[in-house]
Image (spheres, helix red, strand yellow):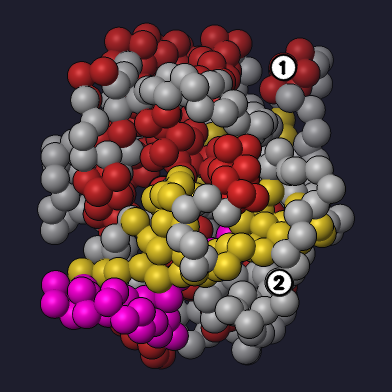
């Protein structure tokens, strides 16, 4: 799915290239276009934080990018948490806008953080005119480090229990959310244990780089569910490569995915971040690597609080007058675009570190939705969705020397899982 022309023009217009002397000359000579880049990333890598504290120049994995930190990079430490709000700015961010002149605290916190939010500002190159081929190596000229603390305004919703407690109950094995019909949960222990094990494999110490710091991520609450109909917009949210729908010349955009009265056949999120995995999505995957990609994207969405931020932004604009000019109606498209790109970058990185074949990551969303993808592990072609092209670009630049013979596809394991799923819910394999 491509971005509406108006949105694309607005995206190009608002992200003004920054002039960096020699960098500009190099970009002009090689048909590169420079663009300002800003973002926020929750890191659990203590080595990165220690290097930032020492102001050690180098290239670091930040937000799925290889980010260059130099002696000229301004590094600011804040002994307060980063405050996320409901209102989006034109960069598609729900945090205070970062400028080179923003207030900067230079003193380190009393105790060095084990995890922290990194708010960065820098420059990124693109090949051609349409920003579809970005360089995945970026140059940071400012990084702000904020405490990782919940700011107290999370949206919360039932359920709180795990699939084990729900499935062990004598009550109906259903999830209930306000204003929605009950959702049937697949309570087969072998199905749920398999999903749990793949999640754990993505969270354990790196299979590729065993000396890397252990991530402090937690497994999100998840349920394997049967397809269900959504009754209202903004009761659930999905991040699956879809774009916001915008009006004339990119104004007044909306993102209603899944929209009211539609059926959920893939992965969606509840307001408390619970991952609802429709078993129909699993029925069409071919191997464990594709499944690991979907779960890795879910981990990125929940760990980075993207789901929480999406709900907050949506409910700010999702009232009675949502199409009449709330500020988020102008910038929600940029926010959605950012979320999709971020879960792809981070998801591919975590999938690679867990030892899965990342060539199956670009097409995982499409395969789960039964879209026809030719040769999903080959180079991208014109019929691929935009997110597959973006993911292939990420892989070709940052993982060009990977020995794929050492990465796991998991075809036999997934075939066995599909046999179990067919026994548990034969209807999952029927055509939509």
Residue 36 is inside the magenta segment: yes
Q: Does residue 57 appear left or right of residue 158 in this picture? A: left
Residue 300, image quadrant: top right
What residue sits 29% from the left and 60% below the top?
Answer: 135
| In the depicted structure, whether residue 164 falls above or below residue 289 | above
Residue 248: horizontal and vertical position, in percent? 41, 90
Q: Does residue 13 appear left or right of residue 279 in this picture? A: left
What residue sits 80% from the left and 52% below the top?
Answer: 109
Residue 139 in view, yes or no: yes
Residue 362, image quadrant: top left
Q: Which residue is mark 1?
A: 164
Q: Does residue 342 appear left or right of residue 49 in this picture? A: left
Q: Which residue is mark 2?
A: 104
Q: In the rendered image, which quarter contains the N terminus?
A: bottom left
The residue closer to the viewer here, 115 or 186, is 115
The residue closer to the viewer here, 232 or 54, is 54
- Using a 10 Å C-alpha cutoff, classify the residue at mark 2 as few (fewer than 14 neighbours), some (14 to 19) or many (20 or more): some
Magenta segment = 14-41
Q: Secondary structure at mark 1?
A: helix
Residue 262: horizontal and vertical position, in percent? 51, 54
| In the depicted structure, whether residue 170 falls above or below residue 376 | above
- Frontmost of labels 2 and 1 is 2
What residue sits 46% from the left and 60% below the top?
Answer: 70
């Amino acid at each position: 799915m491509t971005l509406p022309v108006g949105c694309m023009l607005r995206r190009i217009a608002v992200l003004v290239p920054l002039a960096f002397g020699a960098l500009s000359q190099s970009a002009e000579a090689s048909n590169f276009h420079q663009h300002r880049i800003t973002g926020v990333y929750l890191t659990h890598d203590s080595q990165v934080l220690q290097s930032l504290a020492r102001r050690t120049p180098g290239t670091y994995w930040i937000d799925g990018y290889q980010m260059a930190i130099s002696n000229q990079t301004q590094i600011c430490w804040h002994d307060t948490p980063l405050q996320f709000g409901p209102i989006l700015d034109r960069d598609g961010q729900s945090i205070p806008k970062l400028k080179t002149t923003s207030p900067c605290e230079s003193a380190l916190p009393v105790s060095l953080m084990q995890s922290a939010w990194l708010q960065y500002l820098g420059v990124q190159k693109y090949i051609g005119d349409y920003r579809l081929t970005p360089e995945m190596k970026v140059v940071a000229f400012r990084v702000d480090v904020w405490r990782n603390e919940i700011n107290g305004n999370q949206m919360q919703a039932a359920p709180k229990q795990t699939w084990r407690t729900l499935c062990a109950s004598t009550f109906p094995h259903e999830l209930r959310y306000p204003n929605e019909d009950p959702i049937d949960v697949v309570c087969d222990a072998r199905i749920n244990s398999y999903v749990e094990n793949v999640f754990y494999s993505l969270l354990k110490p790196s299979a590729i780089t065993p000396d890397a710091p252990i991530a402090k991520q937690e497994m999100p609450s998840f349920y394997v569910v049967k397809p269900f109909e959504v009754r209202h917009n903004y009761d659930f949210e999905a991040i699956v490569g879809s774009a916001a729908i915008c009006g004339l010349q990119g104004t007044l955009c909306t993102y209603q995915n899944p929209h009211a009265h539609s059926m959920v056949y893939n992965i969606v999120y509840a307001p408390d971040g619970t991952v609802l995995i429709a078993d129909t999505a699993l029925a069409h995957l071919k191997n464990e690597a594709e499944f690991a990609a979907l779960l890795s994207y879910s981990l990125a969405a929940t760990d980075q609080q993207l789901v929480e931020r999406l709900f907050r932004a949506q409910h700010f604009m999702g009232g009675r007058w949502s199409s009449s000019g709330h500020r988020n109606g102008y910038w929600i498209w940029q926010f959605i675009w950012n979320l999709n790109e971020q879960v792809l970058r981070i998801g591919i990185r975590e999938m690679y570190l867990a030892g899965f074949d990342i060539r199956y990551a670009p097409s995982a969303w499409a395969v789960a939705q039964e879209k026809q993808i030719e040769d999903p592990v080959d180079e991208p072609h014109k019929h691929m969705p935009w997110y597959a092209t973006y993911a292939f670009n990420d892989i070709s630049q940052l993982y060009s020397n990977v020995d794929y013979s050492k990465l796991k596809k998991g075809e036999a394991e997934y075939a066995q899982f599909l046999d179990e799923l067919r026994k548990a819910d034969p209807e999952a394999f029927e055509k939509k």
